Amino acid sequence: MPVAAPFNVTLDDPRPGAYMIQNSTAFDPESDKKLKGLGRAICRDTPLSKYLIETHRRQYPKWVSDTRKDGYSEEQIDMYVITHYAVMYQSNLLSKLSYHPISSWTDLIPDTTGQTQLDYAEKFIAMDDKDLREYIKKRKQANTRIGPTEEEMLKKRKTDGMFSYEVQVAKEIGSIEYKFDYLKGCPYYSPDFVELILKTAYRTDAVLPRFTALYSNAQALDFLNNFLPTTTQKMVFVYGEQDPWTGSAIPDPTNPNVKKIIVPRGCHNDYFNEPDKCPVETYNEIMRAVREVIK
């Protein structure tokens, strides 16, 4: 019974990213508007972009100095900084959507004014997934918005524990590529920097070149194209409707031994027995299919 099993066709597959962009529009149009509005505001010559440039230059003087030595002009440095903020805010916030329904945290997407809101949003983006679950649980219990007064509960995301997964991503699974076409035309937006930033952030080409050089999805595609259509083994594939990996899920099966179940508004988790995460009728459908597998 595979859960959230992607079958990506390239190392950076655009389908899961496009799927999430589509979902943010379909499931919560207002949040989609806020997400894209924030990106556009960051990439234009506004008090917001000036604040980000000044903050980044102040916090990372060595990076600025090293980048200048590498031959980048001051204008290019500013463009890199702004593109970085726009891309990382957008991609990380969209990734959060894969763990929790967007309605759980839509009010935390900052508007286009105010330094405090940006500081808070940055901590929210970096929140550890376990803390994020507790955070949303407390919000639901309190039935109120949680503001910056609770910043102490936010922790920096720990990445070291993800290293084995990142190796697997680099060698065989592939990663998610988000498109930022809606930022085209903004003065500070640079498509060239986007590619560099994303690869650096997700530790594929930048940190794991010896693994990405070995990337091959041949085994996965053989499983998808040859094994699934003919297997006599009963299999149940479960995907969340709001999980990016559903964008590269198996196609609708033609083999009666293979079943594909989409959890309505489900995310990148396996909380099938929790009514607020999975409708009862979907849970029952999953259990019937599992019993067929194990009987």
Image (cartoon, rainbow, N blue to C red):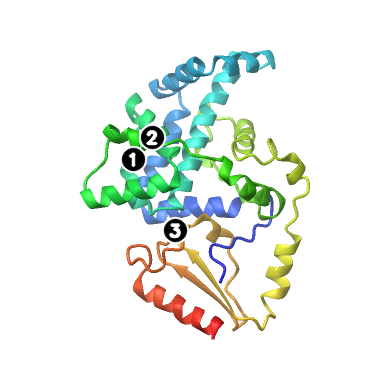
Evaluate if marks 2 and 1 touch, with contact meaning CB atoms under 8 Å apart.
yes
Asked if residue 232 is positioned above or below residue 42 in the image, the reply reads below
Any mark on residue 267, and which? 3
Spatial CA distance of label 3 from label 1 is 18 Å
N-term mark: 3 or 2: 2
Asked if residue 188 is positioned above or below residue 110 in the image, the reply reads above
**Which residue in the rendered view is the most extreme toward the bottom?**
295
- Mark 1 is on which residue type? Leu
Q: Can residue 1 be seen in this view?
A: yes
Residue 67: x percent and y percent? 64, 18
Any mark on residue 121, and which? 2
Task: Name the image quarter holding residue 263.
Answer: bottom left
Residue, disc 1: 108
Spatial CA distance of label 3 from label 2 is 21 Å
Q: In which quarter of the image is the C terminus?
A: bottom right
Left or right of 167 in this view: 153: left
Task: Name the image quarter holding residue 217.
Answer: bottom right
N-term mark: 3 or 1: 1
Element type where label 1 sits in the image = helix
Residue 281: x percent and y percent? 37, 76
- Residue at 41%, 66% in the rendered image: 264
- Mark 2 is on which residue type? Ala
Element type where label 3 sits in the image = loop
Spatial CA distance of label 2 from label 1 is 7 Å
